[in-house]
Image (tube, helix red, strand yellow):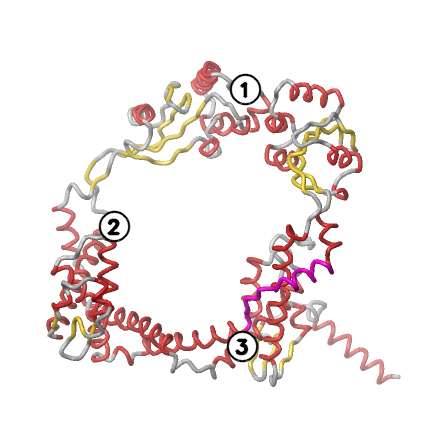
């Protein structure tokens, strides 16, 4: 008994030292979540994959997403293992693509070594460029201004919430001017320009920022606005004036006068970059010219006068170097045709054709130079080559897991017969409904009289629907609905209304509704649902193929997932609120 008590006491001490959080604390980034043979997948790997998956998996349960992340990591590792045995070296199409990519790598590294790395710009050159180009480095006239717009409104969606509540908006040009005059008087008495712009400006895009339009040069705005903005002192507000958009009040918050830009650090950086680019370009041209001269290029000029069709039949050389680098006539023909197309069919001159041939052989000359300088054996080049080859191998393995399946007509018909009731259940008797809802029958009947007198249902709905405009828009147009979606009395009326007709007030638990039917969708026939069925079959076959592919990847490999560690990984899908209290 005493031994038992001692053991119990020791266990209590152990659990106390471990603490209540010791058994459920979040795992460390290096903790192992899964093993594939001797390869380990860590918590950090899973969290990174979760971050990638969460961008397009909104609404998926956290535990399901964590399991998907682990499965993908396992499959990716197994795909890389299989990819090692995929032969690509004897595929001429791939070799051609790889050589093109590697020639670009070699050219870039070559230019970095013999051009970019030796080009420099002195501070004195920057100063000299600035002094000799006073007209290039200048400030233009610029102002930053805010405005309030009062305009004649035809669509009430253009109103702010406060304008809707107060009714202080213009349905005529005269009223717009009156509102602009009133706002100007309020500003003169000390009212905040920014606040008035947010609540009353008809230009909602700038109004939400206190009317701020940002900075702009002369000529960007309409002439009347431009004239006022560039004549106002900073901080002052203009009286109302009219443009094609309505009546404006303008406040200038910043002005920059035209003049020579001082040579500060920012401008020094700009000029230095300009000079660097110019020097790199000049040295690049000189370097390429030196390669051409050393190559002793020879041109087969008999091809220059040939037609494109005749030239395409030629397989012999069009330009060659003394080292054996060669561009053939058929390649020259296709490039020349493309160049002539850009000139809208005009023929290239002799010099233009020779220039095109030089451009075509340049990559071969650059590649040869890169080889002579050892660039094609450099770590950067070899690493890129390995990436290209491994990427091709992995792509081929991953493509094995995807198929483009086209179901036959018999498959589609059989699927429809098996699932016909489900399709009809989903879509039967659906109607596209718009509505207004009122607290009293009297209110509903008053608006119904307006509609019968010619009022537009949509505009009246936006005018009378309670709540914020965004909510009203969504609640006003219900889209296609089915019987379970709405109260029985509501749907019974909607189902019998003619297209475009408006119902008498219909009472439900939410009030009195005016209903309009916009469209009606009948029971779905086989022809209507054919595309949906084809897509469903295609998805099933693709999922089945992918599952079989994943199973084949895992054959012969020992895979172990540490469920406890996986469960302890903390992850909360986007949009999920935490239930924990601070």
Q: Earlier in the sequence, mark 3 or mark 1?
A: 3
Residue 563 x %, y %: 68, 73
Q: Is residue 298 visible?
A: yes
Find the residue positioned furthest to the right.
1
277 and 376: which is toward the camera: 376
Question: Please, what secondary structure does the residue beneath circle 2 have?
Answer: helix
Residue placed under numbered mark 2 in the picture: 265
Horizontal side of residue 545 vs 221, given as left or right: right
Q: Residue at x 34, y 36 (%)?
A: 215
Residue hosting label 3: 77
Q: How far apart are labels 3 and 1 at the CA level?
A: 66 Å
Left or right, 291 with respect to 417, comes to left
- Residue bounds of the magenta highlight: 401-418
Q: Dots 2 and 1: beta carbons under 8 Å?
A: no
Q: Quadrant of residue 231?
A: top left
Residue visible at 20% across and 36% down? 259
| Residue 405 sits inside the magenta stretch | yes
Dot 2 or dot 1, earlier in sequence:
1
């Amino acid at each position: 008994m005493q031994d038992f008590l001692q053991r119990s006491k020791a266990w209590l001490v152990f659990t106390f030292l471990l603490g209540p959080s010791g058994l459920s604390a979040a795992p460390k980034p290096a903790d192992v979540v899964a093993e594939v043979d001797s390869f380990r997948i860590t918590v950090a790997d899973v969290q990174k994959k979760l971050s990638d998956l969460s961008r397009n998996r909104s609404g998926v349960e956290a535990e399901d997403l964590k399991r998907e992340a682990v499965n993908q990591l396992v499959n990716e590792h197994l795909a890389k293992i299989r990819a090692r045995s995929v032969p690509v070296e004897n595929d001429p199409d791939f070799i051609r693509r790889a050589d093109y990519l590697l020639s670009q790598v070699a050219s870039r590294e070559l230019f970095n070594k013999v051009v970019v790395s030796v080009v420099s710009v002195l501070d004195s050159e920057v100063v000299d460029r600035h002094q000799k180009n006073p007209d290039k480095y200048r400030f233009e006239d610029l102002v930053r201004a805010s405005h309030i717009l009062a305009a004649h409104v035809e669509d009430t969606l253009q109103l702010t919430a406060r304008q809707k509540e107060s009714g202080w908006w213009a349905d005529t040009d005269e009223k717009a001017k009156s509102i602009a005059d009133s706002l100007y008087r309020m500003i003169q008495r000390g009212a905040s320009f920014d606040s008035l712009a947010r609540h009353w400006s008809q230009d909602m895009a700038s109004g939400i920022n206190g009317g701020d339009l940002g900075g702009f040069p002369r000529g960007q705005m309409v002439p009347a606005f431009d004239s006022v903005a560039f004549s106002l002192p900073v901080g002052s507000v203009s009286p109302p004036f009219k443009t094609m958009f309505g009546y404006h009040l303008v406040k200038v918050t910043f002005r920059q006068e035209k003049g020579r830009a001082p040579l500060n650090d920012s401008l020094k950086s700009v000029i230095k970059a300009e000079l660097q680019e110019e020097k790199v370009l000049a040295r690049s041209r000189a370097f390429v010219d030196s390669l051409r001269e050393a190559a002793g290029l020879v041109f087969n000029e008999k091809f220059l006068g040939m037609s494109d069709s005749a030239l395409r039949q030629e397989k012999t050389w069009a330009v060659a170097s003394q080292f054996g680098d060669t561009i053939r006539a058929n390649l020259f023909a296709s490039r020349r045709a493309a160049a002539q197309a850009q000139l809208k069919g005009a023929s290239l001159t002799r010099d233009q054709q020779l220039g095109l041939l030089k451009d075509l052989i340049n990559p071969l000359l650059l590649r040869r130079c890169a080889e002579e300088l050892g660039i094609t054996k450099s770590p950067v080049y070899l690493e890129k080559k390995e990436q290209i080859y491994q990427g091709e191998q992995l792509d081929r393995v991953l493509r094995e897991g995807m198929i483009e399946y086209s179901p036959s007509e018999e498959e589609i018909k059989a699927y429809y017969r098996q699932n016909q009731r489900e399709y009809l259940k989903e879509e039967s008797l659906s109607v596209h409904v718009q509505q207004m809802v009122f607290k009293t029958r009297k209110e509903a009947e008053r608006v119904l009289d307006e509609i019968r007198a010619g009022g537009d249902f949509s505009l009246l709905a936006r005018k009378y629907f309670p709540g914020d405009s965004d909510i009203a828009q969504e609640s006003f147009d219900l889209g296609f609905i089915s019987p379970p979606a709405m109260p029985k009395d509501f749907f019974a009326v909607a189902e019998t209304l003619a297209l475009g007709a408006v119902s008498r007030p219909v009472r439900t638990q939410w009030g009195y509704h005016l209903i309009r039917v916009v469209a009606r969708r009948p029971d779905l026939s086989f022809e209507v649902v054919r595309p949906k069925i084809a897509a469903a079959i295609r998805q099933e076959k693709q999922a089945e193929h992918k599952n079989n592919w994943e199973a084949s990847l895992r054959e012969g490999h020992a895979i172990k997932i540490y469920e406890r560690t996986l469960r302890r990984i903390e992850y909360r899908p986007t949009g999920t609120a935490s239930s924990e209290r601070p």
